[in-house]
Amino acid sequence: MACHAPSCVSYTCRKNGMPDKRRSKYEAKGDKSVNYFENIDWKGIKKDVQKGMEKGMAAMKKGAIVAQKKAGELTDEGQRQYKILRLKAKMHTGMSDLGARVYELMSARAKNPALDVRVKNMVEEIHTLKVQIMNIEKKRTVAARKKAA
């Protein structure tokens, strides 16, 4: 019985022994002994895939640890910069207030504005802020040296 189409893959055509052009020449002849997938070492492939997965996971863990450490360092640096900025803003405000107070005293014809108690307190506050800024910057340089080493 002839097939209705040369490329037919219907059950009837295969049942009547007509070759399927899409199947390999061995399957078309009915030779089932030569099959590509039967000759593959699946255990070896499974072992290779597992090794690759383990190596990939180890590399991913190392990368995550490095990223976490770097994020911590950046967070610390950001906090230091914020503290320095906040202290500099306070120092700037203090200097502005000091200048206003000295101007006020000079306008009132005070003999020596440096002897005024409020001026002395403002100068002390500014000096304290300046020392705090220097301490934070020292910590930053120490952290940078540790990072470089």
Image (cartoon, rainbow, N blue to C red):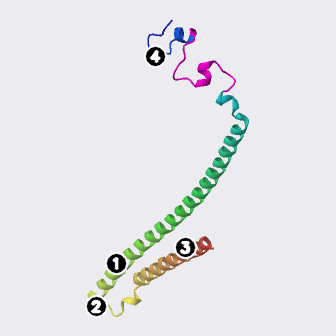
Q: Residues within 10 Å of mark 3 (few under 14, many from 20)?
A: some
Q: Residues within 10 Å of mark 1 (few under 14, many from 20)?
A: few
Q: Amino acid at mark 3?
A: Arg
Compared across the picture, whether 147 is left or right of 3 comes to right
Return the residue at label 1: 96
Q: Residue 129 at what x, y percent from top left?
A: 48, 76
Residue drawn at x 44%, y 14% is 5
Q: Residue 61 at what x, y percent from top left?
A: 64, 51
- What element does badge 4 sit on? loop
- Residues at marks 1 and 3 touching, judged by CB atoms closer than 8 Å: no
Q: Earlier in the sequence, mark 4 or mark 3?
A: 4
Query: CA gap, disc 4 to disc 2?
Result: 117 Å
The residue furthest left is: 107
Badge number at residue 6: 4
Q: Residue 12 at what x, y percent from top left?
A: 53, 8
Q: Based on the picture, tell me whether residue 26 belongs to the magenta stretch.
A: yes
The residue furthest bottom is: 111
Return the residue at label 2: 109
Q: Amino acid at mark 4?
A: Pro
Query: CA gap, disc 1 to disc 3?
Result: 28 Å
Return the residue at label 3: 140
Highlighted magenta segment, given as a residue range: 15-34
Q: Is residue 116 above or below residue 37?
A: below
Q: Amino acid at mark 2?
A: Arg
Q: Amino acid at mark 1?
A: Ser
